[in-house]
Amino acid sequence: MPGKGHDRFRRLGGDLCQDGIVLVLRVAGGIVHRLSPLWRLVRTAGRSGRFLLATFPLTACGGPLSSLAPGGRVAGDIAFLWWAMLAASGLAFAIVMGFFLVALLRPGRLGQIPVGRWLLWGGFVLPLAVLTLLVSIGFWVGERAIMRGAEPLVIEAEARQWSWTFRYADHPDLPPEENGIAIPVGQPVEFRLTSADVIHSFWVPRLAGKLDAIPGHVNRLRLIADDAGEFGGVCAEYCGPGHAIMPFFIRAVPVAEFERLTGGSE
Ligand SMILES: [Cu+2]
């Protein structure tokens, strides 16, 4: 893909890569340098202090692009599935670590259990129970995300290297919006996604899951915003050197304001 714009993005990609390597080296050096005082802090913090230290990484769960801070029903269901998967994997990890400790502290104890029992409970019953639970929740979340029977507001979204264009299907008279569009609060919205060039992926983490925008094909994604506000979106499928700089936003506004913006009733 020749052209000035392409060269600019290629240079940008090279710069980002160099900066990234320098950053990784600095962080690694910093970790080695700081590890001993940090370890001392953890050791001397006491039980409640350690609990407090452990909560710091959890602050990463928030933020404008966090699917763990859902802003609507569909994203809320997906976040629930995420927590269910974390709980299930945490349980599996705890069971394995329990056996590990028994093997470590009471050598030979686990060897008394017949092989057939290991296979039945560890190889069949436990995976079947965990996977049945997770698949059931997954089907339930997927079914709710479809919003059967709803009559959503339809927005056509076209991705291209490296931007998004949005237009309201029922308002062909309105000019298309670049890299952001308004939706009404509390109403189902259907995005009809396609691409003008390569495969991109539409992702507004606080409102819905991600879905590919494919050239020559239309994918449909439904979402709903519970409250007014601006929700950040990104392309979630690598689509070329400018992939990282094609963010967009969805602005949820009260229904009355939305009608005023679009000059009609939705
Ligand atoms: Cu992309």
Image (cartoon, grey):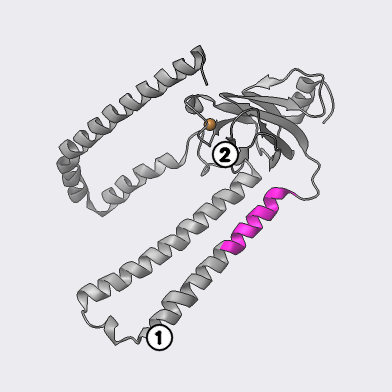
Instruction: Please tell me which residue lies in front, 144 or 258.
Output: 144
Q: Are marks 2 and 1 in contact (CB under 8 Å)?
A: no
Whether residue 186 is visible, yes or no, is no
Main SS, magenta region, reads helix
Name the spot of residue 113 as percent of width and height, x first. 33, 86
Name the spot of residue 249 as percent of width and height, x first. 60, 27
Single out the residue that lies furthest toward the front.
2
Q: CA distance from mark 2 to mark 1?
A: 46 Å
Q: Residue at label 1?
A: 116
The residue at 46%/60% (across/down) is 87
Q: Quadrant of the C terminus?
A: top right
Name the spot of residue 156 as percent of width and height, x first. 72, 31
Q: Residue at label 2?
A: 206
Residue 166 position by quadrant: top right
Q: Which residues are magenta?
A: 135-147
Q: Amino acid at mark 2?
A: Arg
